[in-house]
Image: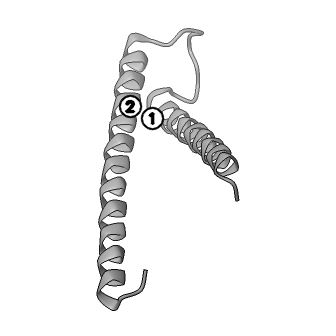
């Protein structure tokens, strides 16, 4: 696979993953903060605050997980390189 095609596939996958995260966040925060039976057409102040906090927490956790997974991935790559160097295969 040529590098340009690989880059395009990676970009498409990233967009898909971000859309999935957005959809999950929207559903989770809506379930948590907005009652199932609407009394008013506009969100109340309490609902708005709840949604703001929910989204902030969701994004913070997503960022932390991404950083941790990156660190773990880099550690795995380093370990694999060391193992390959130790066995003499490259």
* Mark 1 residue element: helix
Q: Which residue is mark 2?
A: 54
Rendered residue at 55%/37% (across/down): 27
Q: Nearer the viewer, residue 72 or 74?
A: 74
Q: Nearer the viewer, residue 40 or 90?
A: 90
* Mark 2 residue element: helix
Identify the image quadrant of residue 56: top left
Q: Position of residue 60 (x, y in %)?
A: 33, 37
Q: Position of residue 74 (x, y in %)?
A: 33, 61
Q: Position of residue 71 (x, y in %)?
A: 30, 56
Q: Position of residue 76 (x, y in %)?
A: 34, 69
In the rendered image, the vertical position of residue 83 relative to residue 39, given as above or below? below
Residues tagged 1 and 2 counted as in contact (Cβ below 8 A): yes
* The N terminus lies in quadrant: bottom right
* The C terminus lies in quadrant: bottom left
Rendered residue at 60%/9% (across/down): 41
With 41 as the anchor, is 78 left or right in this view?
A: left
With 27 as the anchor, is 55 left or right in this view?
A: left
Q: Which residue is mark 1?
A: 32
Rendered residue at 54%/41% (across/down): 24
């Amino acid at each position: 696979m040529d590098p340009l095609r690989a880059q395009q596939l990676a970009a498409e996958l990233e967009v898909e993953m971000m859309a999935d995260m957005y959809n999950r966040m929207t559903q989770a925060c809506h379930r948590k903060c907005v009652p199932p039976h609407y009394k008013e057409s506009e969100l109340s102040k309490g609902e708005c605050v709840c949604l703001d906090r929910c989204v902030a927490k969701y994004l913070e956790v997503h960022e932390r997980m991404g950083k941790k997974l990156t660190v773990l991935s880099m550690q795995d790559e380093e370990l694999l390189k060391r193992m390959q160097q130790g066995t003499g295969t490259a």
